[in-house]
Image (cartoon, rainbow, N blue to C red):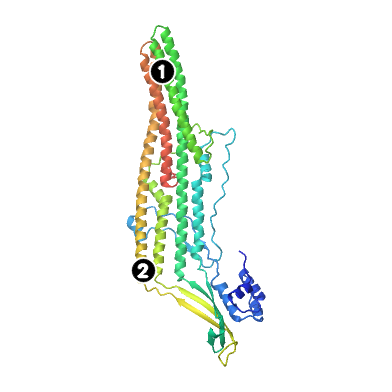
């Protein structure tokens, strides 16, 4: 919007003024910070009323200051152990924000990042680790980008809460000379006044503190979304790995089934039963049917992972041959302590509790009055003046106003409302903490069970099943057992190999869910 020159503005609202060029230059210099007292002295030599300078100085230095800088800290570490009475009484409190009154610069605002379209996978590098897909999802997923934009939006509310309200400029004039205000100095032509409202000093600090805590709440929500997307990528990747591993296991067992057909045919040629050949061929057909189901599961897992990485049309996603599975943490109490320190869900509840305490503080500050400071200038003329001693000297006045917080019922009701919100936030934190501990303990036990199952399959069951199949095949060649026992051992081998792969994928998935519940990766020193 194009700004109007000061002379046009004053002429429009009824100000009689002769020259404003030097005054306009003086005001511009003051806005740039180059204002010198000599400029004001030079401007006073011109035929400009002194009242204009008073109003201009009051406008510049009283109501047009830039908001102070808010020094924000990172999400603090909360106590490792907390009790419910402590949460309600104020023991659990995130680090206070510092409002620096000496700073005049704008606070640093987190701008939404520009995200480029995802790049295609490099040629010859189709199989990628889960970490590469996690990085891709964290950079491109729309939910994460939306949460980052909400953090930036909340950051922009901080200077709004810290700033003063706009000053009020008013002009009163009497166009009819015989109906205008008469003074001893002459007839009043018009009166211009400028007023600025100043809240009680602590009120703006409390509002800024509330806005800063809203920023931290948005950041905690962003961390929750990132953990949720990370968990979803890991689960989809592990499903894809299991499907690929199951296809590989089934293909290997298909080769064993083909050997069983050859074995049955050789036995049949030596005078055995044709039924053994048919049963061996049936096992091969059943494996082909299982491969169809597994390929469909793999395509579904690929689609889920491609959608999470913003590449829905990609179909060449392949997992690595093996997945890295961390050790299962056995100390649940250490996981509880880590969750209280770094869980974004608990951090959000703590910041909400701190925000509601600041709102209660703001409600208590409403007992104190707000102030209004103003200045006015009235033009006096000797034209049509009724006073015999009229001299035409302009009048300058100053005004001071104060609000009267006398409606105590409204103020007390707002305090009780904010106190109830503090109690509700405290109870919400307790509920969230209990639910977090429940999920940690549940996922930890499930991960321990999956780890034990996988070890049992790898160390004991699978070696014995493979040996049993080898022995039954040798005995079948020597006509010591029938073909049904060979088929049973073959079926058990396939089943336990698939269950072992499923146990490993389940273990990796439970560890991913456990990491989300805790909020960070926990490393135990040996």
Q: Where, quadrant-wise, is the C terminus in this rendering?
A: top left
> Gap between marks 1 and 2, in whole Å?
83 Å
Which one is in front in this view, the residue at disc 1 or the one at disc 2?
Answer: 2
Above or below: residue 372 compared with residue 254 = below
- Residue 107 in percent (x, y) is at 54, 61
Q: Which mark is residue 410?
A: 2
**Residue in view at x 43 percent, y 10 percent:** 266
Q: Is residue 223 visible?
A: yes
Q: Is residue 524 visible?
A: no
- Residue 403 in percent (x, y) is at 43, 74
Q: In the drawing, does residue 70 fall left or right of residue 53?
A: left
**Residue in view at x 49 percent, y 41 percent:** 308
Q: Secondary structure at mark 2?
A: helix
Q: Which mark is residue 420?
A: none
Q: Earlier in the sequence, mark 1 or mark 2?
A: 1
Circle 1 residues within 10 Å: few <14, some 14–19, many ≥20 = some
Q: In the drawing, does residue 52 fall left or right of residue 95?
A: right
Find residue 62 and report its image quarter.
bottom right
Above or below: residue 512 compared with residue 165 = above
**Residue in view at x 46 percent, y 66 percent:** 205
Q: In the drawing, does residue 272 fall left or right of residue 40?
A: left
Q: Which residue is mark 1?
A: 282
- Residue 216 in percent (x, y) is at 46, 56
């Amino acid at each position: 919007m194009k700004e109007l020159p000061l002379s046009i503005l004053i002429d429009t609202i009824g100000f009689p003024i002769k020259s404003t060029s030097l005054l306009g230059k003086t005001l511009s210099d003051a806005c740039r910070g180059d204002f010198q007292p000599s400029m004001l002295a030079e401007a006073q030599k011109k035929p400009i009323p002194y009242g204009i300078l008073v109003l201009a100085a009051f406008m510049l230095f009283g109501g047009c200051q830039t908001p102070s800088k808010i020094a924000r800290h990172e999400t603090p570490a909360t106590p490792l152990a907390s009790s419910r009475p402590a949460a309600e009484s104020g023991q659990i409190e995130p680090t206070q924000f510092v409002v620096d009154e000496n700073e005049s610069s704008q606070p640093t605002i987190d701008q939404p990042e520009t995200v480029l379209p995802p790049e295609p996978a490099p040629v010859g590098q189709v199989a990628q680790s889960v970490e590469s897909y996690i990085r891709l999802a964290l950079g491109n997923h729309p939910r994460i980008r939306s949460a980052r934009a909400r953090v930036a939006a909340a950051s922009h509310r901080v200077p709004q809460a810290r700033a003063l309200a706009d000053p009020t400029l008013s002009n009163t004039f009497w166009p009819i000379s015989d109906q205008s205000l008469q003074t001893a100095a002459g007839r009043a032509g018009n009166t211009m006044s400028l007023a600025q409202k100043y809240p009680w000093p602590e009120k703006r600090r409390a509002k800024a503190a509330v806005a800063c805590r809203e920023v931290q709440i948005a950041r905690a929500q962003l961390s929750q979304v990132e953990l949720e997307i990370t968990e979803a990528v890991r689960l989809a990747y592990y499903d894809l790995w299991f499907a690929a591993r199951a296809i590989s296991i089934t293909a290997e067992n298909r080769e064993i089934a083909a050997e069983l057909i050859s074995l049955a045919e050789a036995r049949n040629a030596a005078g055995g039963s044709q039924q053994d050949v048919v049963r061996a061929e049936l096992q091969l057909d059943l494996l082909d049917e299982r491969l169809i189901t597994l390929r469909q599961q793999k395509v579904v897992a690929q689609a889920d992972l491609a959608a999470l990485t913003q590449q829905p049309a990609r179909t060449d996603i392949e997992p690595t041959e093996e997945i890295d599975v961390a050790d299962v943490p056995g100390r649940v109490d250490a996981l509880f302590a880590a969750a209280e320190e770094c869980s974004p869900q608990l951090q959000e509840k703590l910041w909400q509790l701190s925000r509601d305490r600041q709102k209660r503080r703001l409600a208590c500050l409403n007992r104190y009055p707000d102030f209004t400071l103003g200045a006015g200038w009235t033009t006096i003329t000797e034209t049509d003046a009724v006073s015999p001693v009229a001299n035409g000297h302009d009048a300058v006045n100053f005004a001071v106003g104060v609000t009267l917080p006398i409606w105590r019922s409204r103020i007390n009701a707002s305090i009780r409302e904010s106190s109830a919100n503090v109690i509700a936030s405290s109870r919400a934190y307790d509920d969230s903490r209990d639910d977090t501990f429940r999920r940690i303990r549940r996922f930890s036990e499930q991960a321990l069970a999956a780890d034990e199952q996988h070890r049992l399959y790898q160390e004991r069951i699978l070696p014995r099943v493979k040996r049993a199949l080898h022995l039954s095949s040798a005995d079948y060649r020597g006509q010591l057992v029938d073909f049904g026992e060979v088929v049973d051992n073959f079926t058990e081998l396939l089943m336990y190999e698939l269950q072992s792969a499923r146990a490993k994928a389940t273990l990796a998935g439970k560890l991913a869910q456990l990491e989300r519940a805790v909020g960070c990766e926990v490393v135990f020193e040996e």
